[in-house]
């Protein structure tokens, strides 16, 4: 059964996919040609593959790691003692393992395209190419950026700018910034100039915690979004603003009247105890991400809906719209890798009727990433019967465990 991701119409049809043709052919009786690969989708559901609006490859090896040297008492200390300790410890091999696992986990959850925001301060040069190659090895398309920041000094910030420019010369990507409170005016201006030069956009964390606003008011005498607006960050239709929890009404107006997109990361916000997303006053340009917590976009959709019952203006339809807005963002900005020939096949064992009228109820209360049986990315079958076709899953897991142990040991030395 094919489900049109835009209209939610259900249709019983054959589908022909051509790797070098972004269009799909629909007919009840398509005759296969010699050499065609057939997938029997009887009793299963086929629809547009999923995509993630904000991920962090660098966090992939954090699962199960030991406690930090100091128990964090606030968001800034969570960054300092956990994530900034972790990203400083990453080597090329650790980054490669992180990217391989992230791509694998994404694909197994029906995600064929990932927007990532990376940081590895002691492995900057060629970090984006390392991630890109790992993603492509699995078969997952991507939109990458390196997190430029002044927190490790201007030299490292300039290295981040250089890595970004080197990458953008040959591949699609964004200009990454950590957050306003770690990016000075000089680096901010250079990043905006780089985005203009390569007709790209900025990808930055915005008002994830009140600390971001307090710092901006103290050092720049303006709120975070006002600062970004003054630099022109909101003028890029490719810009992505992560989190956006602690915004004033004026800031929401500035975002809504600009071209940038907002990406919501509910579970990460819960984990860091920084607050709750509220779309009131914002436009519908809202994406969903995982913020590196996991690679399951259906899980992120459920979290946005359930938590939003008390804190947000959200219902079934808006939850689905936010899940699917990533396709609109990618298409409108002419990014490649998320065309019509990206399909997911769900083996969804529903105990009740499943149709257009109750699709959204099944989305929130039934359908899960684990139901992914096949995934076609850019016309290529990359998950078959729940297993990757282009890579050895066990080898990736073994490599990840080896690199994870090395990472944890290294973190204890910092």
Image (spheres, helix red, strand yellow):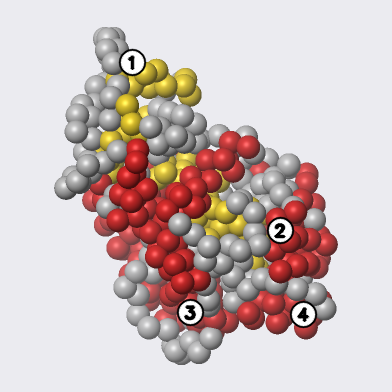
Q: Is residue 23 left or right of residue 185?
A: left
Please say whether residue 371 is visible from this viewpoint.
yes
Residue, disc 3: 273
281 shown above or below 127: below
- Mark 3 and mark 2 in contact (Cβ < 8 Å)? no
Q: For numbered disc 1, what is the local secondary structure?
A: strand
Secondary element type, mark 4: helix
Q: Earlier in the sequence, mark 2 or mark 3?
A: 2
Earlier sequence position, callout 4 versus callout 3? 4
Q: Residue at x 27, y 12 (%)?
A: 29
Disc 1 marks which residue?
27
- What whole-number distance in Å separates the C-alpha atoms at marks 4 and 3? 22 Å
Q: Which mark is residue 255?
A: 2
Residue in view at x 26 percent, y 57 percent:
398
Distance (Cα) linking label 4 and label 1: 60 Å
Callout 3 secondary element: loop
Q: Is disc 4 in contact with disc 2, using a CB cutoff of under 8 Å? A: no
Disc 2 element:
helix
Q: Are marks 1 and 3 in contact (CB under 8 Å)?
A: no
Give the camera-side residue of 267 and 193. 267
Alpha carbon separation for disc pair 2 and 3: 24 Å
Assess disc 4: are there few (<14), some (14-19) or many (≥20) residues with their C-alpha within 10 Å of its C-alpha: some
Query: Which residue matches tag 4?
Result: 217
Quadrant of the image occupied by residue 293? bottom left
Identify the image quadrant of the N terminus: top left
Q: Disc 1 versus disc 3: distance between alpha carbons?
A: 50 Å
Please report whichever mark, 4 or 2, sits nearer to the chain's N-terminal start: 4
Q: Residue at x 38, y 59 (%)?
A: 302
């Amino acid at each position: 059964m094919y489900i049109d991701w835009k209209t939610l119409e259900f249709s019983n049809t054959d589908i022909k996919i051509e790797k070098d043709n972004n269009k799909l052919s629909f007919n009840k009786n398509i005759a296969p040609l010699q050499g065609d690969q057939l997938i029997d989708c009887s009793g299963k559901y086929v629809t547009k593959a999923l995509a993630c609006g904000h991920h962090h490859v660098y966090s992939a090896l954090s699962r199960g790691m030991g406690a930090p040297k100091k128990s964090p008492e606030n968001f800034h200390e969570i960054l300092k003692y956990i994530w900034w300790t972790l990203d400083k410890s990453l080597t090329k091999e650790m980054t490669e393992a992180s990217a391989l696992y992230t791509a694998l986990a994404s694909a197994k959850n029906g995600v064929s395209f990932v927007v990532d925001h990376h940081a590895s301060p002691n492995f900057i040069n060629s970090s984006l190419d390392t991630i890109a190659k790992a993603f492509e090895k699995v078969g997952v398309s991507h939109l990458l950026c390196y997190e430029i920041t002044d927190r490790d000094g201007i030299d490292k910030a300039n290295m981040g700018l250089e890595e970004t420019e080197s990458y953008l010369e040959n591949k699609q990507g964004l200009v990454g910034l950590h957050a306003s409170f770690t990016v000075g005016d000089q680096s901010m201006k250079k990043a905006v100039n780089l985005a203009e030069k390569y007709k790209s956009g900025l990808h930055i964390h915005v008002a994830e915690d009140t600390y971001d606003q307090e710092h901006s008011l103290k050092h720049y005498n303006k709120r975070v979004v006002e600062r970004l607006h003054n630099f022109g960050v909101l003028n890029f239709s490719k810009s992505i603003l992560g989190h956006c929890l602690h915004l004033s009404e004026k800031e929401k107006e500035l975002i809504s009247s600009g071209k940038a997109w907002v990406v919501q990361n509910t579970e990460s916000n819960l984990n860091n105890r920084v607050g709750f997303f509220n779309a009131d006053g914002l436009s519908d340009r809202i994406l969903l991400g995982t913020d590196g917590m996991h690679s399951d976009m259906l899980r992120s959709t459920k979290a946005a809906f359930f938590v939003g019952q008390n804190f947000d203006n959200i219902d079934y339809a808006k939850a689905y719209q936010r899940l699917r807005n990533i396709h609109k963002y990618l298409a409108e900005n002419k990014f490649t890798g998320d065309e019509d020939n990206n399909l997911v096949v769900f083996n969804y064992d529903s105990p009740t009727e499943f149709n257009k009228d109750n699709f959204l109820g099944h989305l929130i209360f039934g359908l899960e990433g684990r139901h992914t049986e096949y995934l076609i990315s850019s016309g290529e079958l990359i998950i078959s019967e729940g297993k990757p076709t282009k890579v050895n899953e066990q080898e990736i897991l073994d490599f990840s465990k080896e690199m994870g142990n090395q990472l944890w040991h290294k973190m204890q030395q910092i």
